[in-house]
Amino acid sequence: MIETPKNLTRNILLGLLFGFLVASFFYYSSFISEDLKSFVAQYIFNLGGDIFLNLLKLLVVPLVFFSLVSGISSLSDTSTLGPISLKTIGLYLLTTAIAVSTALLVGAIFQPGAGYAAAMPTSIESLPGGQSLYDTIVGIFPKNIFQAFVENQMLAIVFFSILFGIALNKTNHLTGNLSSAFEKLNTVFMQLVIMIMSFAPIGVFCLIGRFVITDGLDIFQDVFIYVALLISLLIFHALFTYSLFLKYLAKINPIAFFKKMKEPILFAFSTSSSAATIPVTLKTVSQDLGVDKNVASFVVPVGATINMDGTAIMQGLATVFIAQISGIDLTLFQYIQIVLLAVATSIGTAAVPSAGIITLVIILQQFNLPLEAIGIILAVDRVLDMIRTAVNISGDATVACIVARSENKLDEKAILQN
């Protein structure tokens, strides 16, 4: 088993703390020149953060491809893929529906937009368009796999990897056990993940620092109730909803689960990208949580694409918030429509920072809510997106454990180890 660098979690937390403190010092110190602040922001925080993100994203496609191919090609019975796929997608859609329903209920009860007068306009034309459900389904079946690799089209890559793995499985006796080569390549890329993780404290220092040195913390005071409610909902969904699923469906102690998930959660928080966190999540799920690599290599990449529980919570609460500040009362039927629309759009949401804002535009347009009010959400979205991503990858790991349990492919001894 490939070992993780010692004290990595502690060092990542220290990186977060020092990044916050150093960037706050530069942002709030009046005696430091703007030129120096700009230089530090650009050539220390931005540069370091981008390099770290690029290193993580560098491994996403090859790791997913080799992990899936090696796992499927080694299956004794490839017919098990069908049930695994149905369980995975069904569970992801179920948790997303629960997430957005909870957000709508809390928004209706606590009225975060009541009495809110100010509005922050934004240019909606500057936002990219969302991807329709039709385009998402068509995109699963790529016409050019090399283009899919280059553009990180994760569903297309997963589909091709499954096909390739099945074909390799059926022809392994004709190719001189070629599948063993893919298993070795998968091991090499897992080692690359560990090597890059060694630099995580520095990367996290830069990522949190570039947010604070640019925006500070003052943006939260104007929409405090919305921000507080959203953070509370995200924490509740992660600690309560996922814990129930883990306890009763995966038969796993939630406390042990979240202890094992510390590193992926910190990575997701700092990168705001489920896709960039795939390598770390895959390693933790397969090695530390005991999920069979064949299950993990399918469930985690699919989850990074369609499991957007944190985003669904934001969309639900933000829609209610914007409706309330606009003086518009939503009906029960409209609440149901929001749930269905949030679940549907989560499938097409890219696993990149702030992609949920794009699908929020789709929901607001559906109910004729003022798009200009989305500027309020954008003003505080960056740090909230970090928390949402941490929730999303926790959901990925939860579903992986449940599916593995249902297929009798969960090693209970792994999660009990320190």
Image (cartoon, rainbow, N blue to C red):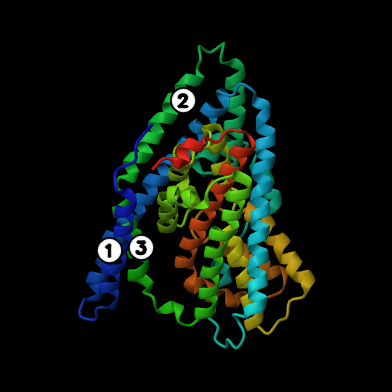
Residue 295 relative to residue 180: left or right: right
From what the image shows, is residue 73 above or below residue 378?
above
**First in sequence: mark 1 vs mark 2:** 1
Which mark, by number, is residue 18?
1
Residue 322 seen: no
- Disc 1 marks a residue whose amino acid type is Phe
Q: Secondary structure at mark 2?
A: helix
Left/right placement of residue 253 relative to residue 114 reads left
**Residue 351 position within the rendered picture, expressed as x and y whole percent measured from the top left:** 53, 52
Q: Check disc 3 and report the residue beneath it.
A: 208
Give the number of the mark in front: 3 or 1.
1
Residue 80 point in image, percent of width and height: 66, 30
Q: Amino acid at mark 2?
A: Glu
Q: Nearer the viewer, residue 150 or 21?
A: 21
- Cα separation, mark 3 vs mark 1, equals 9 Å
Q: In the structure shown, which secondary structural element does the residue marked by tag 1 occupy? A: helix
Q: Earlier in the sequence, mark 3 or mark 1?
A: 1
Distance from disc 1 to disc 2, alpha carbons, whole Å, reads 39 Å
> What residue appears at the point 57 percent right and 32 percent down from the top-left corner?
161
Residue drawn at point x = 65 percent, y = 63 percent: 100
Residue type pointed to by label 3: Ile
Question: Residue 201 in the image: x percent, y percent?
Answer: 30, 53
Q: Residue at x 68, y 53 (%)?
A: 94
**Precedes in sequence: disc 2 or disc 3:** 2
